[in-house]
Image (cartoon, rainbow, N blue to C red):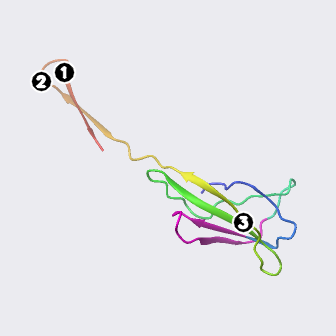
């Protein structure tokens, strides 16, 4: 789970909602709906409450909304997050070749 980009706190916010999707044309999923305490600089930080799939590299789309006491959501702040997990390493096999000093090398994935 990765830290998400810090956002400046809203004075009117009672809670914050964090939405996520991994398809640019897909539907948002509500990941978090609650209070976030601002630090001494007025910055709110939240660790992403889900594990981001990054096999082969993948974009993830987030947006955060400040929610006032009446349930109204603010104008969205959004960003794209790139997650990449390396592919499984290849296996190198080294075997004796046809004569002294020669080797056969094979690579399997």
Label 2 element class: loop
Q: Which mark is residue 11?
A: none
Pointer 1 residue: 102
Q: Is residue 58 left or right of residue 99?
A: right
Quadrant of the rendering where the N terminus is positioned: bottom right
- Front residue of 63/35: it is 63
Residue at image location 82% in from the left, 62% down from the top: 9
Of labels 3 and 2, the one closer to you: 3
- Front residue of 80/92: it is 80
Give the mark nearer the N terminus: 3 vs 1. 3
Q: Is residue 17 above or below residue 94?
A: below
From mark 2 to mark 1, how far is it between C-alphas? 7 Å
10 Å neighbourhood of mark 3: few (<14), some, or many (≥20)? few
Residue at image location 72% in from the left, 66% down from the top: 76
10 Å neighbourhood of mark 2: few (<14), some, or many (≥20)? few
The image quadrant of residue 31 is bottom right
The image quadrant of residue 73 is bottom right
Residue at image location 83% in from the left, 79% down from the top: 69
Pointer 2 residue: 98
Q: Please provide the residue range marked out in magenta.
A: 17-36
Q: Position of residue 87 (x, y in %)?
A: 41, 47
Q: Residue furthest top?
A: 101
Pointer 3 residue: 76
Q: Residue 32: within the magenta?
A: yes
| Dot 2 and dot 1 residues touching (CB under 8 Å) | yes
From mark 3 to mark 1, how far is it between C-alphas? 64 Å
Of labels 3 and 1, the one closer to you: 3
Quadrant of the rendering where the C terminus is positioned: top left
Label 1 element class: loop
Q: Residue 57: within the magenta?
A: no
Q: Residue furthest left?
A: 98
């Amino acid at each position: 789970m990765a830290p998400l980009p810090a956002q400046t706190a809203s004075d009117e916010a009672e809670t914050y909602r964090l939405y996520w999707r991994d398809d640019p044309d897909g539907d948002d999923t509500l990941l978090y709906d609650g209070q976030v305490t601002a630090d001494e600089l007025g910055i709110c930080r939240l660790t992403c409450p889900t594990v981001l799939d990054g096999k082969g590299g993948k974009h993830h789309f987030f947006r955060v909304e400040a929610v006032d006491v009446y349930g109204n959501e603010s104008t969205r702040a959004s960003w794209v997050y790139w997650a990449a997990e390396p592919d499984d390493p290849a296996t190198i096999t080294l075997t004796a070749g046809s004569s002294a000093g020669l080797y056969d090398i094979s690579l399997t994935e």
